[in-house]
Image (spheres, grey):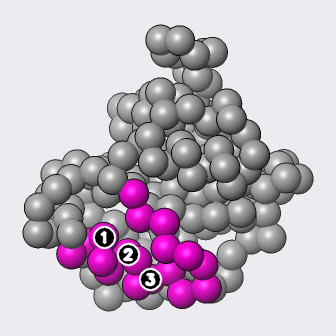
Amino acid sequence: MMVATPRTVPVTTEVLECTDAYVVAVWRRIMLLVWRGKATAAGIERSRELFGRWAAGHPGGAVFVVVLPRQDTGPPDEASRAAMQRAASSASRHLRGTATLVESEGFIAASVRSIMTRLYTKRAPNVFRTAAEVAAWAAALLGEPELTPAGVAEAIRVAREG
């Protein structure tokens, strides 16, 4: 799907998989796992498979960003936490970094950010509140200034509509 954003080049976001529970989409060298509700171990495992195949086509590596729903964000269940830890400990050689976007506010959102930070065992925790923070992190990590806040926000919007 091609969508133009103000003051940027067109954003081409490709949806790789769309279910009732999640959407996996890619834009440039970013893979997005956008949850529509509660995270599931099956969705985490499936996104890990998709990342491995997709990222192999990016010799300079890619990043993986988990996007939690804006509302009703609760902590992951035990099976999902275990799947997240498996994914984090068996990362693809093409994985340059992993981040989580938690846009909601309040006590529950702060608790989720804290849990997500603890799940990053071998890498620095990258838990963000805005698409602009994700864009700055990814652009610096990948050396790709074209990863703009507007582009990341648009890619997330397209994935949410999946």
The disc labelled 2 sits on which kind of residue? Met
- Residue contact at pointers 1 and 2, CB within 8 angstroms: yes
Callout 1, which amino acid? Arg
Q: Magenta region: which residues? A: 111-128
Question: Badge 2 is on which residue?
Answer: 116
Q: Secondary structure at mark 1?
A: helix
Q: Which residue is mark 3?
A: 119
Q: Residues within 10 Å of mark 2 (few under 14, many from 20)?
A: many
Q: Quadrant of the C terminus?
A: top left
Q: Would you say 112 lies left or right of 30 here? A: left
Q: Is residue 149 left or right of residue 55?
A: left
> Does the magenta-highlighted stretch encompass residue 29?
no
Q: CA distance from mark 1 to mark 2?
A: 5 Å
Indicate whether residue 119 is drawn in magenta: yes
Dot label at residue 113: 1
Q: Earlier in the sequence, mark 3 or mark 1?
A: 1
